Image (spheres, coloured by chain):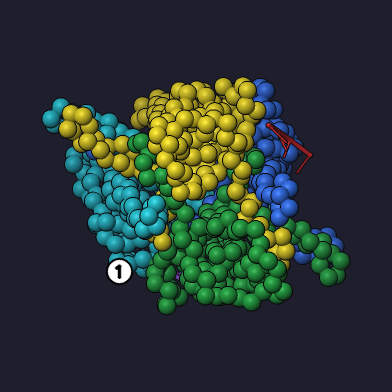
Chain colours: A cyan, B blue, C green, D yellow, E purple, F red
Amino acid sequence: MARGINKVILVGNLGDDPETKYTQGGMAVTTIRLATTSVRKDRDGNTQERTEWHRVKLFGKLGEIAGEYLRKGRQVYIEGSIRYDKFTGQDGQERYITEIVADEMQMLGGPGGEGAGRGGEYRSERPARAPARQDAAPPRREAPPAKSAAFDDFADDDIPF
Amino acid sequence: MARGINKVILVGNLGDDPETKYTQGGMAVTTIRLATTSVRKDRDGNTQERTEWHRVKLFGKLGEIAGEYLRKGRQVYIEGSIRYDKFTGQDGQERYITEIVADEMQMLGGPGGEGAGRGGEYRSERPARAPARQDAAPPRREAPPAKSAAFDDFADDDIPF
Amino acid sequence: MARGINKVILVGNLGDDPETKYTQGGMAVTTIRLATTSVRKDRDGNTQERTEWHRVKLFGKLGEIAGEYLRKGRQVYIEGSIRYDKFTGQDGQERYITEIVADEMQMLGGPGGEGAGRGGEYRSERPARAPARQDAAPPRREAPPAKSAAFDDFADDDIPF
Amino acid sequence: MARGINKVILVGNLGDDPETKYTQGGMAVTTIRLATTSVRKDRDGNTQERTEWHRVKLFGKLGEIAGEYLRKGRQVYIEGSIRYDKFTGQDGQERYITEIVADEMQMLGGPGGEGAGRGGEYRSERPARAPARQDAAPPRREAPPAKSAAFDDFADDDIPF
DNA sequence: TTTT
DNA sequence: TTTT
């Protein structure tokens, strides 16, 4: 049972094309970089911009869709959670990385969206247990788009409203 | 494929005990009323309060847990979506109702929480197809608490981080 | 001091052009209708769509900007809160209305966006006390776009990070 | 004009008492550490927990209130944005830090809440220009609690609903 | 009434 | 109808 809420909502543009890798179990893991920019006036009245570059990871079906349809420049809505990781680099130094783990994605009508229609929302399917191991699993890009789960929550058709 | 985002986040206190009904298929549907209060100063500098009373519906396992653990006065976090419904009353008049359909619930450490520990987060399981019809399905309150889905999204244990 | 959280996040398309009115004090009040659509499979495996039509109100500068730049079909991000209102119609019947009061708005890159650039985020300025009453205040559409407040929170330039 | 949305919502417990510093301009900057925990089942069916420790910064009035009322163990709601910072350590190494900059805070009914009532929500006032410099500004802890801004957005009392 |  |  989880304790606490860890929720992130981003609307930003991709700084580059997505990168997709696959686990040994064959699950897609796509990484995108998203920019969000805020603006302020400094004490001299000059406009100052600041851009945050978010590192967003998408797993499973969501990762496949992201890898297939997102492109550099595209505007996207992401909902997910923050994850702080620590690892040891090849130089023996400890390093820290912060990532947003997506569980929902919506392509918005931004630039770079040719070839993919203009929008569409996808939710993270909780990936089932990893399938039987397939060494260095091949892409299997033919996977169909995830079906949305949002409305499945009403799956009983005789709800007593 | 869904289009658009419809997301609600509430932290409020229950105005009354929850009410649980069951569909003919045996799915729990729990309704709670949540208060959120905002404050402002009017033009005369007097403090003005305004309370919104939200009607929140929880389905399936989430509805069972809510019915079992939530009580009047308890503070709760809800995440869900807005749903506007129209129906015809017994007097033939059209009526409108706005509800929040919950897909996540977190009991907070507020008052009224005796007997239930102090917290815990639950996510809406996408209810599977309705089970074989059981006329006027009995409660089956012995259902175990839903397992959280939040972390299940990492279900492949050899993720290439 | 407020108690509770009442937060709504929407990404949707306008069903019609915005409507702007002005208070006697000269404050703009713009209403837009936003569609969000979710999809589910029913028990027969057929795809079912459901669209919610949100009524969103934007006040002050935010209302002026919305009235000027938003148009039917345009995709927009809204952040705000839910407000339930009750009033008595001319027939003496009690009526209920649910509205989203916006405090942030971001135009997204959707269709219908000619003449307005492609995006831009705006926050609700807390409107100052109402200006001296101007009977049936004239539009004053020449108002400049609101400056974003997001980054103003760092207004002290010698922050000890 | 900002572009994009960068929004974080947390409900968690403080891992330690808050730390408050002051800028040379006299603005409070309070840092708290918040834990959020998620749970999953691994492939062997064992329950795995994972806790994220968020570093949250609160500025100005919000920082003063946090420093005064929050304590280790207390449960709190935070809304803010993610900020990635890079700096050079004393060893000449580049380091990265991720922080949540709060613009809303709500004390929840969790443990550790003695002496401060049980709740209350506060919003970040956009801090005005820094006051005249006061070298190593003294705390001025007597500052009154920030007034909530949420409802101020309706400041014109003759709104044409 | 939008959108895909 | 809650809560502080």
Q: Is residue A119 above or below residue C9?
A: below
Residue farthest left in this picture: A91
Q: Quadrant of residue D142?
A: top right
Residue A4 appears anywhere in the view: no
Q: Residue at x 20, y 48 (%)?
A: A138
Q: Quadrant of residue D86?
A: top left
> Which x, y percent locates residue D30?
45, 33
Question: Residue B41 or A52: which is nearer the viewer?
Answer: B41
Q: How many marks?
A: 1
Q: Is residue D134 above or below residue C79?
A: above
> Which x, y percent locates residue C142?
52, 75
| Label 1 residue SS | loop
Q: Quadrant of residue D110?
A: top right
* Amino acid residing under circle 1: Gly
Q: Residue at x 36, y 36 (%)?
A: C160
Question: Residue A80 or B31: which is nearer the viewer?
Answer: A80
Q: Chain of mark 1?
A: A
Q: Is residue D8 above or below residue B106?
A: below
> Which x, y percent locates residue D149?
60, 48
> Which x, y percent locates residue B37?
68, 44
Q: Residue at x 63, y 67 (%)?
A: C27
Reading the image, the residue beneath label 1 is A115
Q: Is residue A55 left or right of residue A161?
A: left
Residue C154 appears anywhere in the view: yes
Q: Residue at x 36, y 50 (%)?
A: A62
Mark 1 Cα shell of 10 Å, populated few (<14), some (14-19), many (≥20): few
Q: Is residue C60 above or below residue A127?
A: below
Q: Is residue D30 left or right of residue C87?
A: left
Question: Residue B62 or C126: which is nearer the viewer?
Answer: C126
